[in-house]
Structure formats: C-alpha cells, structure tokens
Image: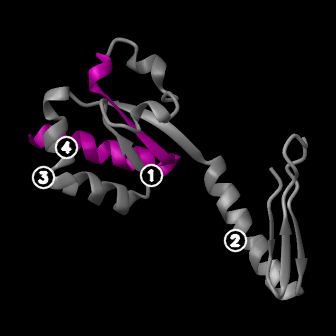
C-alpha cells in the first residue's frame, strides 16, 4: 500500500506495497520538512526500542494488580508509557511473545503478564508490578 499525504507546504510518500525499500521521502518547505524528519526519527527510534517482556504475577492477584475499574492498570500504562496485557484479555494473544520466554519456561502461562513498550519503561513497570504484589 502506498501512502501519500499532501498538505499545502509538504509531501510525504512511503514505498508502494511490495517494494522492499523502507525509504520515506519528504518534500516541501525546508524548515517544515526538517521538523517532520526529526519527529519521524523519534518515532522510529521509539519503535526500534519497543520490546515485550513477561512477568510472573500469580493469577489470583491479577484482579488486584488491575485495580477497581482498571484504575491501577491505566495509571501504570500512562505513567510508564507501556501496554500491559493480562492473560484472558482480548489483546493478550495479539501481542508478540515475551523476549524473556526462556526465564518464564517453568511459570504457569495463566500467570504471565505481558508488558510492551520501551525497554527501560518495561523494566520499571515490571519492578512496580512486583512491588505491588509483595504488598498484597
């Protein structure tokens, strides 16, 4: 699929479907193109740093970790800029397998919570989830 977006001052074109290139062309007013380039590079950097890690949270504690109305879950996701999927959620199987699958091989799959986002944010989120479980 080719993506082309035009505005009065710039043009954005991505490769057509089936084209092997990952090149993106920006044309237009130089200052605007430079700002767009910087923003796109930030997005690409964030996507490259995106990982999925699993954490062992006993299934009996999932409800408490999510919180009433998802309050605790939403707070963690907003604070750390990650996505957290609990087993049984609609999105759980749509997320890749955790990078640390090997260290979770002896863990009951019903206990594996997936955290996806930038590496540092995932690690901080997992630490917070584990502290929360210790308090319960």
Q: Name the residue under label 3.
A: 68
Which one is earlier in the sequence, the residue at label 2 or at label 4? Answer: 2
Alpha carbon distance from label 2 to label 4 = 34 Å
Mark identifier at residue 121: 1
Alpha carbon distance from label 3 to label 2 = 36 Å
Which one is earlier in the sequence, the residue at label 2 or at label 1? Answer: 2
Name the secondary structure under disc 2: helix
- Whether tag 2 and tag 1 are in contact, CB under 8 A, the answer is no
Task: For label 1, count other residues whose C-alpha is less than 10 Å away and answer few (under 14), some (14-19) or many (20+).
Answer: some
Q: Residue at x 41, y 39 (%)?
A: 91
Q: Residue at x 50, y 48 (%)?
A: 117
Alpha carbon distance from label 4 to label 3 = 9 Å
Q: Mark 2 points at which residue?
A: 39
| Mark 4 vs mark 1: in front | 4
Predominant secondary structure, magenta span: helix
In screen coordinates, is 93 left or right of 55? right
Task: For label 3, count other residues whose C-alpha is less than 10 Å away and answer few (under 14), some (14-19) or many (20+).
Answer: few
Q: In which quarter of the image is residue 77?
A: bottom left
Alpha carbon distance from label 4 to label 1 = 17 Å
Q: In which quarter of the image is the C terminus?
A: top left
Which one is earlier in the sequence, the residue at label 3 or at label 2? Answer: 2
Name the secondary structure under disc 3: helix
In screen coordinates, is 101 left or right of 90? right
Alpha carbon distance from label 2 to label 1 = 20 Å
Q: Where is residue 46 in the image (x, y as percent from the top left)?
A: 61, 56
Mark identifier at residue 65: 4
Q: Quadrant of residue 123?
A: top left
Which one is earlier in the sequence, the residue at label 4 or at label 1? Answer: 4
Q: Give the range drawn in magenta.
A: 108-136
In screen coordinates, is 42 left or right of 56? right
């Amino acid at each position: 699929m080719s993506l082309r977006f035009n505005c009065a001052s710039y043009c954005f074109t991505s490769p057509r479907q089936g084209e092997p290139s990952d090149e993106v062309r920006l044309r237009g007013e130089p200052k605007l193109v430079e700002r767009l380039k910087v923003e796109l590079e930030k997005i690409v950097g964030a996507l490259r740093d995106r990982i999925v890690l699993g954490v062992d949270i006993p299934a009996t504690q999932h409800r408490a970790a999510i919180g009433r109305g998802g309050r605790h879950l939403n707070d963690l996701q907003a604070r750390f800029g990650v996505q957290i999927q609990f087993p049984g959620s609609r999105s759980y199987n749509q997320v890749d397998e955790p990078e640390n699958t090997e260290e979770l091989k002896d863990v009951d799959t019903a206990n594996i919570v997936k955290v996806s986002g930038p590496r540092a944010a995932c690690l901080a989120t997992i630490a917070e989830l584990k502290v929360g479980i210790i308090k319960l």
